[in-house]
Image (cartoon, grey):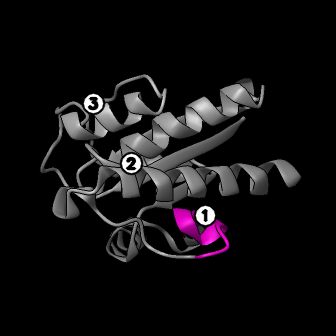
Amino acid sequence: MIHVLFVCLGNICRSPMAELIFKKLVQERGVRDRFSIDSCATSGYEVGNPVYPPALRTLRAHGVEGNHTARRITPRDLAQNDYVLVMDEENLRAVNRLAQANERGKIRKLCSFTDRPRDVADPWYTGDFERAYADIREGCAAFLDFVLQD
């Protein structure tokens, strides 16, 4: 089983979008049973809240179903997951501060697996959920290709 954790600031936009997109991708590829997939936040701002409605509408417009309740990352998450995929540089710094030295190698930016490594812009601030969806979808597809080639 490959344990994958997606992380963003509040766990109501980007990381749950990534979790649900990745779940759909692995289902479509017929490898869902090989993965444990979750998401969480670096902050406690939104703990207990559902996926932000504009993010959920964007997912549904692309045929991605599901839901998630925001939660904050714990040291146990870092110990139990094989890959911890963050959305941006700020998330990367926050998760690395929490991680033990031997855990830092599993922490990567999601779009580092693409041909255009970059941050996933935060739609909470930009309002552009379609752009976030496109970035996340590209990152998830590239990451899945990476994992399955091993």
Under mark 3, the amino acid is: Thr
Considering every residue shown, the one lying at the far left of the view is: 45
Which of 47/25 is in front? 25
Cα gap from disc 2 to disc 3, whole angstroms: 11 Å
> Start and end of the magenta stretch?
105-116
x, y percentage for residue 139? Answer: 58, 58
Q: Which mark is residue 15?
A: 2
Ranked by sequence position, the earlier of labels 2 and 3 is 2
Quadrant of image for the C terminus: bottom right
Which of 128/26 is in front? 128
Residue at 17% over, 32% down: 48
Residue at 45% over, 47% down: 77
Residue at 53% over, 75% down: 101
x, y percentage for residue 22? Answer: 57, 39
Cα gap from disc 2 to disc 1, whole angstroms: 16 Å
Q: Which mark is residue 106?
A: 1
Residue 106 on the magenta span: yes
Name the residue that disc number 3 marks: 69
- Give the SS element for disc 2: helix
Residue at 17% over, 63% down: 125
Q: Nearer the viewer, mark 3 or mark 1?
A: 3
Task: Give above or below for 61 relative to 65.
Answer: below
The 10 Å Cα crowd at callout 1, few under 14, some 14 to 19, many 20 or more, is: some
Q: Residue 116, located in which quarter of the rendered image?
A: bottom right
Q: Are marks 2 and 1 in contact (CB under 8 Å)?
A: no
Q: Is residue 15 visible?
A: yes
Cα gap from disc 3 to disc 1, whole angstroms: 24 Å
Under mark 1, the amino acid is: Lys
* Image position of 140 (left or right of 149): left
Under mark 2, the amino acid is: Ser
